[in-house]
Amino acid sequence: MTLPCFDPSVSADIAICGLGPAGRALAHRCLVRGMTVLAVDPNPRRRWRATYAVWSDELPAWLDRSVIAATVTAPRAHGLREHIIARAYSVLDTALLQQTLDLTGATVVPGRVVSLDRHTVMLDSGRALRAGRVVDARGLRRRPRRAEQTAYGLMLSGDPMPDALFMDWRPDNGADPGTPPSFLYAVPLGGDTVLYEETCLVGAPALTPEELARRLYHRLRARGIALRGDEPIERVRFPVTGGRPGAGRFGAAGGYLHPATGYSVAAALSAADTVAAGGSGWTLAAHTVYRLRRAGLRALLALPPADIPRFFDAFFDLDTELQRAYLSRRDDPAGTLTAMSGLFFALPTGVRARLTAATLGLRPLSPRPSSSVIME
Ligand SMILES: Cc1cc2nc3c(=O)[nH]c(=O)nc-3n(C[C@H](O)[C@H](O)[C@H](O)COP(=O)(O)OP(=O)(O)OC[C@H]3O[C@@H](n4cnc5c(N)ncnc54)[C@H](O)[C@@H]3O)c2cc1C
C-alpha cells in the first residue's frame, strides 16, 4: 500500500475539486470572503466553450452584468400552440464569465483528484492536500444508467435575429413519427450571431448527435434559413442524473442540476455565497424540491412522443410565477408542487393517466414511452 504524501506547503481553508462554472464560482466567492483557497483541476487553464444561458432573474446580485452577451425579454415557446414567456432570458458570454470568476490569490493545483474526504484530497500523482473543508465540484461523468441531454447546434452570423425560441417542438424537423422528439432552441449570442440548436431534452438513451444534426439541417431548410457551410458547431452531451445532494458537493456533482431541464449554472452561481459561508445549500426544502424534480423527470421520460408538445403547452400556459417556481426555485417545495399539480390538471385525461403511472413508478400505460430509464 502506498502511503499518501502530504504536501505541507499546500493547505487552505477550503479545497475545491473541479474548476467548471460551479467550482470556479465557489472558489471566487470564497476568495472574496478572504478565505484561503486551494483549487484542483486536471486542466485549470481550459477555456470554457459551452454556451451558458440563464433566466435573467436567477443571476446573483454580485455577478457583474457585463457577462451577459444578450438578453431576450420575452422568448417564445411552441408546443402545439405558440406561447410568449413573460420572463427575460440571458445568454452569457462564456469567456467573460470565466474571467469574471477571478481566482487571483487561490493556489491552483493542476491534477486529477482520485479520492477525497472532509479534509483531504488525494491526487493521482500520489500527492495529498489538506484543507479545513473539501468540496467536490467535479461535475458528472457519463454512465450507461444516467439519463442525458444532447444537442447539436450551429452558430449563424449575419442574418437578422429571428424571434428567440426557448423551446420549439413543431414537427418540421423530419423526425419519424413515433420516435423521441427534439426541439429547436434559437437564441442570440451577441453581435449578429444566433445559435440554432436541435435538442433532446432528456433521454436514456438520448438522441445521437448525428440524428440531431440531421433534424437541424432539415428544420433550417424547411424554414428557408440558408447556411454557408462553415458555421461553428456546438455539440452538447451531459448527464442530467447522478448528482448527489450533500454538504461536500457542489454544482452538477452536488445535485444542483435540474434533471428535467439540464440547467445548473445559475443555481450554482446563486448558491456560491451560501456554500462559501459554510452552509450546505441543502435545506429540508431543497431536498424536497430535489425529490419533486426527480419525479418530474420520471414523468417526462415516460411520456409517449406525441404527448410531449401537449405537456409543454400546459406548462407554458401556467402563470409565470409558477413556471419560475418549477424551473428555478431550489427551496420552494410549495411553489414546485403547485406548478406540478397545476400542470397535471391542465393536461388531457389520457396524458394524466400516463404521468400518474410514471410518477408512481408503475409501468407506463402507453406501449411506447419516449424512453425508459432507471435513475441513479
Ligand atoms: C455544451 C453545453 C451547454 C450547456 N448549456 C447550459 C446552459 O445554457 N445553462 C445551464 O444552466 N446549464 C447548461 N449546461 C449544463 C450544465 O450546467 C453544465 O454542464 C455545467 O458546466 C456544470 O457545471 P459544473 O461546474 O457543476 O461541472 P463541469 O462544468 O462539468 O465542471 C467540472 C470540472 O471538474 C473537473 N474535473 C473532472 N474530474 C476531475 C477530477 N478527477 N479531479 C479534478 N477535477 C476534475 C473538470 O475538468 C471540470 O473543469 C450545458 C452543458 C453543456 C455540455
Image (cartoon, rainbow, N blue to C red):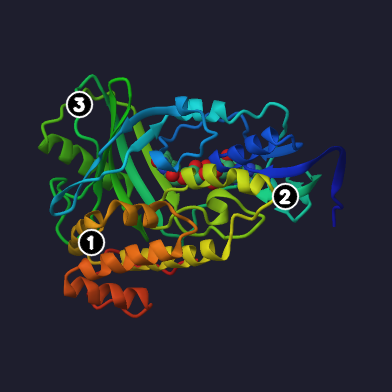
Q: Nearer the viewer, residue 237 or 338?
A: 338
Which tag, 1 or 3, sits closer to the chain's start? 3
Q: Residue at x 61, y 43 (%)?
A: 273
- The residue identified by callout 2 is 134
Q: Nearer the viewer, residue 326 or 160?
A: 326
Q: Are marks 2 and 1 in contact (CB under 8 Å)?
A: no
Q: Are marks 2 and 3 in contact (CB under 8 Å)?
A: no
Q: Nearer the viewer, residue 158 or 371?
A: 158
Task: Tell me if I can see residue 223 in this picture.
Answer: yes
Using residue 132 as the reference point, say whether residue 252 is left or right of it. left
Q: Residue at x 49, y 47 (%)?
A: 267
Question: Neighbour class for label 2 at 10 Å: few (<14), some, many (≥20)?
Answer: many
Mark 2, mark 3: which one is toward the viewer? 2
Which tag, 2 or 1, sits closer to the chain's start? 2
Q: Which mark is residue 311?
A: 1
State the separation of the CA atoms marked 2 and 3: 48 Å
State the separation of the CA atoms marked 2 and 1: 41 Å
Q: Is mark 1 within 8 Å of ligand 1?
A: no
Using residue 345 as the reference point, say whether residue 360 is left or right of it. right
* Residue type, mark 2 in image: Val
* Residue type, mark 3 in image: Leu
State the separation of the CA atoms marked 1 and 3: 32 Å
Q: Residue at x 62, y 53 (%)?
A: 249
- The residue identified by callout 3 is 227
The percent coordinates of residue 222 (x first, y second) are 10, 38
